[in-house]
Amino acid sequence: MPCFICETCGTQYAPSDAPPAHCPICEDERQYVGWNGQTWTTHDALAARHRLRIEDDAGLLGIGIAGEFAIPQRALLLPTDAGNLLWECVSLVTEEAVAALKARGGVDRIVISHPHFYSAMVEWSEALGGVPILLHEADRQWVMRPSERIEFWHGDALRLSDDVTLVRAGGHFDGSTALHWARGPRAGGALFPGDALQVVLDRRHVTFMYSYPNYIPMKTGDVRAMEARLRGFAFEDVYGYTWGRNILGGGRDAVDASFDRHLAAVA
């Protein structure tokens, strides 16, 4: 049976004879149902129409779907002291991408920031030899293709190694996760915040939204809680959710200034 994929958010569902009646992720107010209604594809059909963009993004191997499909996030391979981590996922898996990852030592674990980027995480796990997928427990309800490969973590922080810590930023989703890499990939370390803190187009600030497509701002209490959880983490760079949407240098100051700017604007 095929695993149908929502064409608007890119989420892959459990095997079924027919497409699901609804996509709960798109029907949630943080996302939206496509203007032509709910539509579905399959992995094979997606592979026939699209290819993967596999290239460097600010010193890291990036993988994303070329052309327009669903949400345009890209995954990054992080070669850390906690192992090779695939940060985020996309809806398409190809032999070329798997070979590119294996040529760089493979993937030890998939880590994803929030449900909008779960995409084809189980498909990727299987293609990479059954590697574990690490998600925050607070977002368990949004897993649309369950798998024994999925491991849930709890609390506000999880230290994976001396250099790598997962932080429950919250706000966008209850379990929205940021990854802090203290000594990589460049001097001064980096923050990978997914959509919890989204790098904006000027690449000098981040913003805080409950819904990006529907322009619903994040609650002030959630922004303050996020600010507190990230306090004490040093980083020079912030890697955003898609190609080139990065703050390279001065990242900690940019995030602090963005907290101040947002909280002043909504006061």
Image: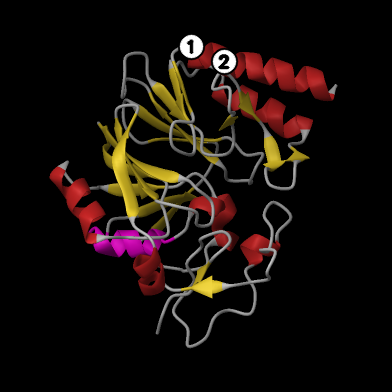
As displayed, is residue 28 above or below residue 81?
A: below
Report the colour scheme.
secondary structure
Prevalent SS, magenta region = helix
- Residue extending farthest to the bottom is 17
**Where is residue 51 drawn, in percent x and y?**
34, 57
For residue 209, what is the image quadrant? top right
Magenta stretch containing residue 122, yes or no? yes
User: What quarter of the picture does the C terminus occupy?
Assistant: top right
Magenta-tinted stretch:
120-130
Q: Which residue shows up at 31% across the image and 19% down it?
A: 186
> Residue tagged by mark 1?
250
**In the depicted view, which residue is nearer to us: 136 or 197?**
197
Local SS, label 2: helix
> Residue tagged by mark 2?
254
**Where is residue 122 drawn, in percent x and y?**
38, 63
Determine crowd level at label 1: few under 14, some 14-19, many 20+ residues with C-alpha closer than 10 A: some
**In the depicted view, which residue is nearer to us: 57 or 106?**
57
As displayed, is residue 112 above or below residue 159?
A: below
